[in-house]
Structures are given as structure tokens and as C-alpha cells.
Image (cartoon, rainbow, N blue to C red):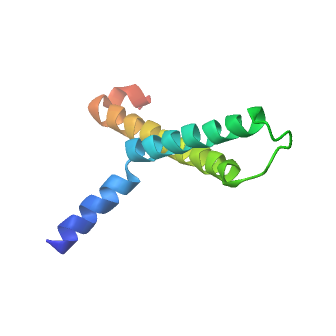
């Protein structure tokens, strides 16, 4: 049962949709904080955690999209073997 749970957990965390969802959530949170900083009354742009959150979110979305597209390509090649040009 522990192995099954572990496999399910890895599947969930490595799934492209999970990566994209986490990346988009981080991107929205980071962009919101950045926007508040830029439009705030402080007059000085502060470098805070949200800059790192934005970079991390872009990485998550890019990784998730890459995995998703690769999986879709593999699926199409298995369903339609002639589509790969062979």
C-alpha cells in the first residue's frame, strides 16, 4: 500500500497539469504582488520574494507544457503510427 501511495504521489506531482496549475497559481500571486509594489505609495521599487515566485512559476509552466506536449506527441504516434512520417 505504501508503494502504491508513493507512486500515486509521484504521478500527481510530476503530472504536467499539476505543474502548469502550480506555475499559474504562483505566477498570478507573484504578478499581483509585483503590481501592488509598482503602484504602491512607497515610491521605491522593492525587490522581494515575488520576483523569485514569478521566475519559479514561469519554470513550472514551461516544464509542464513541455511534458504535456511530449506526452501528446507520443499518444498521437501510438494512435496514428503513420502520422509520425514512418
Residue 38 in the image, given as x and y percentages of width and height: 77, 35
In the rendered image, the residue lying farthest to the left is: 1
Residue 86 in the image, given as x and y percentages of width and height: 41, 32
Vertical order, 7 against 25 (above or below): below
Which residue is at a point 32% across and 53% down the rendered structure image?
A: 12
Which residue is at a point 62% across and 43% down the rendered structure image?
A: 30
Pick the quarter of the image with the N terminus. Answer: bottom left
Vertical order, 45 against 4 (above or below): above
Q: How many marks?
A: 0
In the rendered image, the residue lying farthest to the bottom is: 2
Residue 67 in view here:
no
Viewer-nearest residue: 36 or 84: 36
Residue 79 in view here:
yes
In the rendered image, the residue lying farthest to the front is: 41
Which residue is at a point 63% across and 37% down the rendered structure image?
A: 31
Residue 29 in the image, given as x and y percentages of width and height: 56, 41
Amino acid at each position: 500500500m505504501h508503494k502504491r501511495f508513493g507512486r500515486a504521489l509521484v504521478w500527481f506531482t510530476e503530472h504536467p497539469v499539476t505543474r502548469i496549475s502550480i506555475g499559474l497559481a504562483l505566477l498570478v500571486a507573484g504578478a499581483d504582488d509585483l503590481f501592488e509594489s509598482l503602484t504602491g505609495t512607497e515610491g521605491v521599487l522593492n525587490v522581494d520574494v515575488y520576483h523569485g515566485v514569478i521566475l519559479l512559476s514561469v519554470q513550472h509552466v514551461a516544464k509542464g507544457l513541455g511534458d504535456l506536449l511530449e506526452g501528446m506527441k507520443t499518444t498521437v504516434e501510438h494512435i496514428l503510427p503513420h502520422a509520425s512520417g514512418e
